[in-house]
Image (spheres, helix red, strand yellow):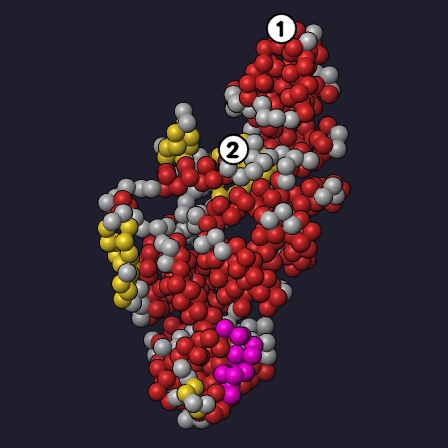
Amino acid sequence: MSVEDYRINAYVRSVLVRRWIDTSMVDFGTSNGVVYLKGMFRQVYRRKTAEEVEGVDDLLAIVHRVEKDIRFIPGVKDVVFRLSNFEKRGGQWRKRSTTLA
Amino acid sequence: MEKKEHDISVMTSGLHVVLDIMNEVERVVTEELEIHPRFPDLHNRLGLIRFKQGKFAAARASFEAAVSINRGYFAGKANLGYALMELGRAAEAESMFADALEKETRPHALAGMACLRMKEKKLDEAATLFKEAAACDPRSALYPHNLGIVCFLLGKYEEALAHLGEAEKLCPPYGEIFAEARLVVGGRPSVEAFREYVSEHELNPFLFELHDHLGHAYAANGLFAEAAGEYRFSVRTMPSLANYYGNLALIESAQDKEQESLQHLLKAVDSEPDSVKARVSLAFEYSARGLAPEAVEQFEAARALKPRYPDIRYNLSLLYLEMGRQDEAVEELHAALKANPGYLFARNSLAFALFKRGEFDAALEEYRKVVAGGLCSSDILVNMGMIYREKGTLQKAIDSFDKAISLNPNYAPAYYQLGLAYQAKGQKEKTRWAWKAYLERAQEDGELEDVKKTIKG
């Protein structure tokens, strides 16, 4: 069997919960060391920052950080995102112009 | 840091940002309602915010919306009863609680009626109703606690203390709360402290949910002491130990206090063994620590409580797979898919389990469903390619490996498998190219050594 999928999956949950990602909106699973996330990426509660007060949406930065956190989990070979509101193109995260079904 | 009501000023990036935590909780529920306008829980939560703000007519409207979506939603109905009570519509509130008397919700219904009697200054009747509620649900600390409050209002201070003592036995965090309120001075009840305690006590127990959310909002902003304060209010309002310890575990985990977090999750399960949420949280904590047998025990207990909950079945299957309990894993995955046929992660793991067992046709069928459902990865395509190769359809295998590479050009196993497929076709140059590409990307493993030898040869 692959490197402890059950353990990777528990770590993924921990990454999402610690960043207050709404786990009722994003599903996740792990198979053979590959992590899959699907759904809408949103934070339930978020840290108020000076940037946000100035109107800058920092959710993009959070997606980036979550991806980084998951890739750092030991045993993770790949991470596949299929988010309805964000996509990664050319190595850059961006908001989807049209919502993915 | 400066705090006033639910406003708090915090420093961030060298600037003061004023947070209105109640406003933050309202923002979240409003956003969620835009996404899920038919979720009764969300209407109920909005109603609780309005209730706490003293906007009882607006609260009533939200609770009515929740109940109109789900007529059997007891928390919504009870909250509606409390809102009607505050609006002076006692008869309607009474009928709301009376409706719930004949069901398992009887103790809460009796407590609601007791609050109505308190409002009407019929304190003896209120005490009788709280006693009846306590007899119906002797494990809950809510009723002796509120009975203690009624006794205080009746001037029966010693009796009040005795009931609070009963509540503390059932819900130990009350001890800390009572000590903080200094209800007892020199072994005798402090009437002043009691008065203050009673004046700030919320008789609607369902307000606990709002305190939980206020706590979460504080915690998300790194204000852990304030979060703990809200969680204390939550357990004081509705003494659910599993919920309280679960909340404490959450803030400890956010502060990297792993051992404390685990201890509180253990306490949560110990205090309420039937709490699925507590069992699942502990199971995930054990899983993250690599304690598979302990995690299995908790997930199995959660499964016994909620057999149709697909996430429990799925995570249990991952543990069984790791422990070599393949048949049980496949059974769990089938159960997860029966509960939710669109659960692609479970289907993907089922395909992988079947593939590992050499059941290639069944695995391929499941993989095709996964891809058709919109979930794809280089790993899935590589496994499909390996099945095609096993079945002797080499070109299909090569196509699948090629697709895997185009999806993720750095996925080393795709190049390795592509090399094997070319080798089987006798295409030496392409084999060499694929394995060179593999070597550039591969981590250290057994296959890597084999390829190195072959390339050199």
* Main secondary structure of the magenta stretch: helix
Residue B279: % across, % down: 61, 58
Name the residue: 23% across, 50% down: B15
Around disc 2, counting alpha carbons within 10 Å, would you say few (fewer than 14), some (14 to 19), or many (20 or more)?
some
**Residue B20 in view in this figure:** yes
Residue B104 against residue B407 in the figure, above or below: below
Q: Which residues are magenta?
A: B162-173
Quarter assignment of residue B363: top right
Name the residue: 37% across, 55% down: B222
Q: Which residue is mark 2?
A: A80
Q: In this rendering, would B82 be left or right of B451?
A: left
Q: Which mark is residue B429?
A: 1
Q: In this rendering, would B226 be left or right of B165?
A: left
Is B172 within the magenta?
yes
Name the residue: 60% across, 44% down: A7
Quarter assignment of residue A28: top right
Q: Nearer the viewer, residue B130 or B329?
A: B329
Around disc 1, counting alpha carbons within 10 Å, would you say few (fewer than 14), some (14 to 19), or many (20 or more)?
few
Residue B109: % across, % down: 51, 76
Q: Nearer the viewer, residue B365 or B302?
A: B302
Q: Which quadrant: the N terminus of chain B? A: bottom left
